[in-house]
Amino acid sequence: MTLAKEKQVLVIFPHPDDEAFGVSGTISTYIKMGIPVTYACLTLGEMGRNLGNPPFATRETLPQVRKKELQSSAKAMGLTDLRMMGLRDKTIEFEDDEDMVKLVDDLITELNPSLIISFYPGYSVHPDHEATARAVVRAVRRMPEADRPKLYLVAFANNTFATLGTPDVIHDVRDAQENKLNAMKAHISQTGWMMPEIEEKLKAEDQEMIDWLSKERFFLYKWKRDFE
């Protein structure tokens, strides 16, 4: 699917590298189309398990390491509007719900996006992912229906396809594959252990890996009363 023309795209994820795996091809493609993209990354992922492979960071240095990696990922995608929102990793689920909704609402008010990309509540596994997803859905739900931006949501829980069905939107991002790979490589403290295998599979023309890299899948939110 060719990407639709948008006025402004707002991407909201909790951790550095959330963007790289699922949507960096989409971000890069929108930017190549001349569409402004803002990425609001809520934390620096400072509680991430990995310290590099072999380790090159410590618990004390990891926040700055991941900040630089996030900036490098943004550069790889061609992204210039990167917002680091300053929340603490692995604590977003404990943030006040209304404060989280206000954070999202403030971004929407400032940017007036035609499209928001985030996680799908109930299908994004990590507590920080879920808290982010709920805040996004709540903020958009409270808008007048005619003013709501589209929501393209990433879901990857084990029951995703059984419950949500097939993705509503599949972006062909083959032309941005190099950007996507470079965005993933930028988060080397977290991805160093997997990149050699990915590159080997690409070299071997592994079709499953090619499809994973070249297609980014999104679900439209099925509006219900879960997150008033």
Image: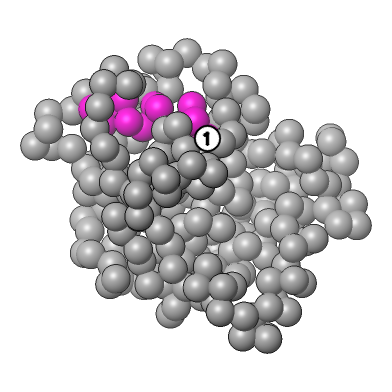
Instruction: Give 48 or 160, whichever is nearer the viewer.
Output: 160
Relative horizontal placement of residue 153, taking residue 205 as reference (left or right) = left
Image height check: is 117 above or below 196?
above
Residue 163: x percent and y percent? 39, 41
Describe the element under mark 1 as helix, strand or loop: helix
At label 1, the amino acid type is His
The answer to whether residue 9 is seen in the rendering is no
Point 68% across, 56% down: residue = 187
Q: Quadrant of residue 64?
A: top right
Magenta residues?
129-141
Tag count: 1
Relative horizontal placement of residue 220, taking residue 51 as reference (left or right) = left
Instruction: Give 117 or 153, whichever is nearer the viewer.
Output: 153
- Which image quarter is the N terminus in? bottom left
Badge 1 local density, few (<14 within 10 Å), some, or many (20+)? Answer: many
Main secondary structure of the magenta stretch: helix
Residue 128: x percent and y percent? 56, 30
The answer to whether residue 49 is magenta is no
Point 42% across, 33% down: residue = 121
